[in-house]
Amino acid sequence: MEATLAQLASLVGAVLRGDPATRIRAVAGVQGARAGDLALLGDSSYLRFLPATGASALLVGPDFDPAATTLPLLIAQAPGQAMEAIAAFLCPPEERPEPGVHPTAVVAADAQLGPGVVVQAYAVVEEGAVVGARTILRPFVVVGRNVRIGANCFLHPHAVVLERCTLGDRVILHSGVVIGADGYGYEFKDGVHHKLPQRGTVEIGDDVEIGANTTIDRARYGRTVVGAGTKIDNLVMVSHNDVIGDHCLLVAQCGLAGTTVLGHHVTVAAQAGVKDHIVVGDGATIGAKAGVMRDVASGQTVLGTPAQDIGRERQSLVLHQRLPDLYERIRALTQQLGELQKEVARLDKAAEDHREGR
């Protein structure tokens, strides 16, 4: 879709500076914008990219100085919200596919599909599975035996939900997600790692979204649980018997070892790792790349490897940055001390010579 700046200004109630006939086809960031793009400049830190931008116009806040550019401007009180509205207008969501089962899909005779369910090409729904009303299964989705999927879910291509696992309502699984793979359990005996059967399940609450290529392992016994409203990024590892509370955020490439417990509203930042059998309290934050080796209290923020309270970790980081200077000072002091020791030894010898009349 395409629109003029005048049309977009009217859409979001923005003030227009520049040619109202400027035509906009898409939205973009300042750095990657090209001709026909409207670029958002919502933060002064991006001003340094302004001279090289290829955008046809900018969306800015009321504090922006128009003298900083010759490009046409849309000036909005809430530029972020205005950008979302414009993006939705220029690139509306795809229409919902028609309900029904594609001829190439395989649906077991005893599987139950609620009203309005969409099963697209080459998807598989196995024996005893139940799929709730208006749920969409995109191509190559696999729904295993005796799985329960709630209403209004959206499973992207190649998402897999294995036997006996459960999804609540309005769950989104992106491509490559695997729910219910075996937990990583082995017993070492007679020089060999013997597989321990993983007989439990996974339960995903309502309104959970799980990013591409994330895996959530089934429990050895019992359940691996993801609470309602939790949002999980791409490439995240959730291990067997983990219990994740409501409304948590797990960011890309973080990993939870087995039997970890997260309270509600916990944030685990990118590439952080949590040891097995750890309890993380409500509202806690685990910083990026942290290695959590012991329990984290409610509301606490930890950082570093091994993770510690963020205040102490920041102090440690400052001291770490000062190590080269401290090393040079210690080396200089060591040299001075050596010279003083030599001088003391010389003076001691001179005094001894004087006493002996030498």
Image (cartoon, rainbow, N blue to C red):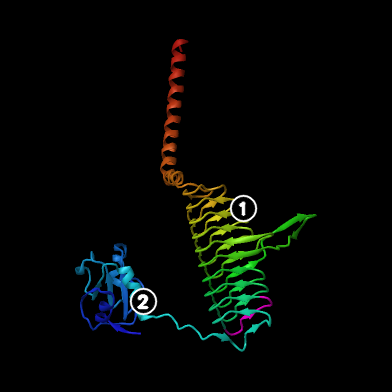
The N terminus, quarter of image: bottom left
Question: Callout 2: helix, strand or loop?
Answer: helix
**In the image, 231: left or right of 217?**
left
At x 54%, y 85%, the residue is 99
- Asked if residue 33 shows in the view, the reply is no
Mark 1 Cα-neighbour bin, 10 Å: few <14, some 14–19, many ≥20: some
- Write down the quadrant of residue 335 in the picture: top left
For residue 348, say whether it is visible: yes
User: On the rendered structure, is 192 left or right of 227?
Assistant: right
Residue 33, given in percent of the width and then of the height, sits at 34, 75
Does 163 sit above or below residue 325? below
How far apart in space, not on screen, are marks 2 and 1 (Cα)? Answer: 43 Å
Give the residue type that dot 1 points to.
Asp
- Residue 326 vs residue 151, the one in the foreground: 151
Which residue sits at x=54%, y=61%? 227
- Is residue 124 magenta-colored? yes
Q: Position of residue 310 (x, y in %)?
A: 45, 47
Q: For residue 155, what is the image quadrant?
A: bottom right
Q: Report the magenta stretch's main SS.
A: loop
Give the residue furthest to the left: 67
- The location of residue 331, given as percent across then percent down, is 44, 38
What residue is pinned by disc 1? 276
Which residues fall within the magenta stretch? 120-128
What's the mark number on residue 87?
Answer: 2
Left or right: where does residue 110 sit relative to residue 336? right
State the residue lying farthest toward the right: 190
- Above or below for 150 versus 288: below
